[in-house]
Amino acid sequence: MPELSKRQREILDFIQENQQRSGYPPTLREICKRFAIASTNGARYHLHRLQKMGYLEVAPNTSRGMRLVGSRPPAKATRSFQLPILGRVPAGPFNLASPDLREDELTVDPEYFGARGAEPDLFGLRVNGDSMVEAGIHDGDIVVVRPQEDAHNGDIVVARLEEEATVKRFRRGLNEIVLEPANRAYKPIHIGDEGGLDYGQNFALLGVVVGLIRSM
């Protein structure tokens, strides 16, 4: 089999990781986004090169029409990590989502979500609602969260208000924090002087969303 370039190996690894994680290969646009390829024609070029080299089967005129075949170098070794799923977090009307409740676990490669070290500090929360659909986060999806107590403007975060939690986009203003939905049917949540909430007692960031596991 012809030797793979670094980019070709990365694309094959990405296809295999997506297949193992979600049960189907990535779309052309997902490949473009992952590798900063300007157009789907560029992604098709790489796939057809891999097909000619015997590593892929590619079906014409389809977005996910690719299948790993042949004898290929194995994908990079992955570490097994049991991602704790801590319950359902509302992305719409509030519901109680206790971070102390481990309702499930998923085996993932933590490096896929940018986590390194022997014990990755990640957890998952299952989304309930549709207030983040315009950010690609749907009801039943699992957001992968890195715990931290602060965030940059524009980050998607998991925040606690009183005893409830929500997934929203984070904005910091002069005298307030704004949690913005990604659905025009919902209004932003204002926290601070104007919102009448004290930061320390009623509001806390649980972490920043670093990945998404799509509900099937």
Image: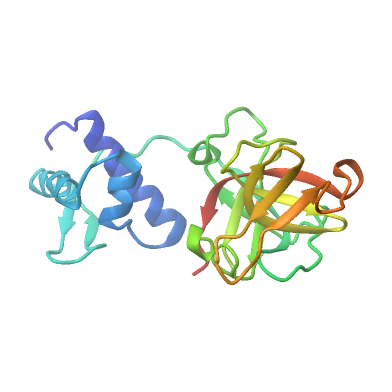
Image spot of residue 147 (x, y percent):
71, 39
Image quadrant in which you'd find residue 142: bottom right
| Residue at the outermost right position | 201
> At 33% from the left edge and 56% from the top edge, which residue is drawn?
26
Image spot of residue 70 (x, y percent):
19, 49
Image quadrant in which you'd find residue 11: top left
> At 30% from the left edge and 58% from the top edge, which residue is drawn?
27
In the rendered view, would you say 159 is above or below 131?
A: above
**88 vs 94, nearest the viewer:** 94
Image position of 25 (left or right of 128): left
Image position of 46 (left or right of 131): left
In the rendered view, would you say 164 is above or below 34?
A: below
> At 69% from the left edge and 49% from the top edge, which residue is drawn?
178
In the rendered view, would you say 208 is above or below 104?
A: above
Give the tally of numbered discs.
0
**161 vs 208, nearest the viewer:** 161
Q: In the rendered image, which quarter contains the N terminus?
A: top left
**117 vs 209, nearest the viewer:** 209
> At 15% from the left edge and 31% from the top edge, which residue is drawn?
3
Image spot of residue 39 (x, y percent):
20, 48
